Amino acid sequence: MERGATVVVVSATSGTTDRLIEIAKSASSGRLEDCEKLVFGIKERHLGILAETGNNPQSQTQLESYFTELELLVQNLAILKELTPRAHDHILSLGERMSSLIFRDVMATLLPARKVTLLDARTVIKTDSNFGKATPQLEVIEKTARERMDLSGETVYVTQGFIGSDLQGNTTILGRGGSDYSAALFAEAISAQVLEIWTDVAGVATTDPRLVKEAKIIPELTYSEAAEMAQYGAKILHPATIAPAVRKNIPVFVGSSFEKDLPGTWIRTSVEHRPSVRAITKRSAQALVTITTPSMYNAYGFMGELFDVFGRHRVSVDCVTTSEISVAVTVDNATLENERFIRDLEKVGNIHIEAGYALVSLIGNELTRKSALAKAIFTTIDDVNVRMMSLGASSYNFNFLVKEEDSKAVIQKLHRALIEAL
């Protein structure tokens, strides 16, 4: 709060969202005993945290109402024996609503001279009705923010990440990891001077420190570099976070809430140092889907028909390669569970699916102009089979698909050769 923040966006306490997901599944399956144990655990944890903050009676009453709400949702699911997407989003929203209530009390204690107000994010973050991964309605969000919020700087708002509501008032969620995205949406709506993301690590690193102990914190990134890193597996950033900041040219700071005096990482329009390879990321649990049809030979319209299927099912594609009669794309393994999507793809052509891959991405600058880069890469990992490559669509990334079991060694070798050695 040293930087004079006026909106503080809070995630659920660690592990709570996972427990709420398990409660929803157990309730719809009639496993009420399992639900009772999980609900009890959430109660005990949040009441314990509230007690440590001073046990504000009003907050305790509000927290108890959230527990009652959760128990009623469990009972309804047990009766209906069906977990609808709308009910799923409603249950998951309780994690952030509980944590933000408690955090409001903490902020009020830390800032006695300022007015600290709990803001229900659902009154501002308006979305469509695509439950599970709703799309924000940007113009409506900016309008509601300016109508409902005092932007004079006298009030500090504590609100929830991850959640919103559709235009009918139904609770929606932005998808896992969406709290950073929520913060960016609030920053955009109020034209904030800076967006700060406080997490458990000291900034954005050159690669996952769990894979490479020599990984270093990057002092500054461009928006483009950060967006590519988020899209291709950097866990510290939600893939959608950067876009709202770019639209309003808002600098983004990423720092550690445990070590707040460390310099962290700044994300801006332009930076001084622009190395060829800035970072290496990984997306695990990837599958390669190849669609083949002889009708593609010397024909037009096939690609449009194919990607219409991806669009209708809201399936994101990371990498694409084509031949005369085939198109190969990488998707998350979870996509393969969508049976309707697979059936619709089969109407377009013959499908071959290969699972067990990881997508390794080099993130940097002007990669398409570095004549020696490919040689350096493939000399470094000449003992690894690369199943697919993607270079050229962006000068900021070079992607290649390798077996999951090879990915750690690949990243370690590339980091040593392309980042540590320079």
Image: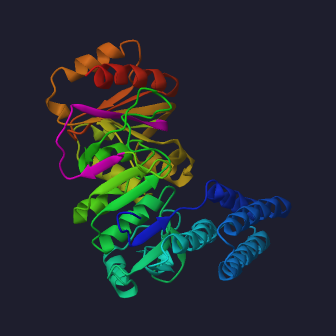
* Viewer-side residue, 376 vs 308: 376
Task: Name the image colouring.
Answer: rainbow
* Viewer-side residue, 374 vs 51: 51
Residue at 74%, 66% (x, y): give it. 43
Quarter of the image for the N terminus: give it.
bottom left
Q: Position of residue 176 (x, y in %)?
A: 52, 56
**Span of residues in magenta:** 263-287
In the image, residue 259 above or below residue 385: below
Q: Is residue 150 left or right of residue 116?
A: left
Q: Is residue 299 left or right of residue 138?
A: left
Q: Hey, which quadrant is residue 271 in on the image? A: top left
Q: Hey, which quadrant is residue 39 in on the image? A: bottom right
Q: Position of residue 261 (x, y in %)?
A: 40, 49
Residue lying at the far front in this picture: please name it. Answer: 113
Q: Hey, which quadrant is residue 72 in on the image? A: bottom right
Q: Position of residue 79 (x, y in %)?
A: 79, 73
* Viewer-side residue, 171 vs 66: 66
Residue at 49%, 72% (x, y): give it. 159
Note whether residue 164 is visible. Answer: no
Residue 100 counted in the magenta span: no
* Viewer-side residue, 111 vs 398: 111
Note whether residue 327 is visible. Answer: yes
In the image, residue 393 above or below residue 89: above
Residue 277 counted in the magenta span: yes
Predominant secondary structure, magenta span:
strand
Q: Is residue 347 left or right of residue 139?
A: right
Q: Is residue 96 left or right of residue 401?
A: right
Residue at 39%, 70% (x, y): give it. 136
In the image, residue 401 above or below residue 175: above
In the image, residue 38 above or below residue 281: below
Quarter of the image for the C terminus: give it.
top left
Q: Position of residue 17 (x, y in %)?
A: 62, 59
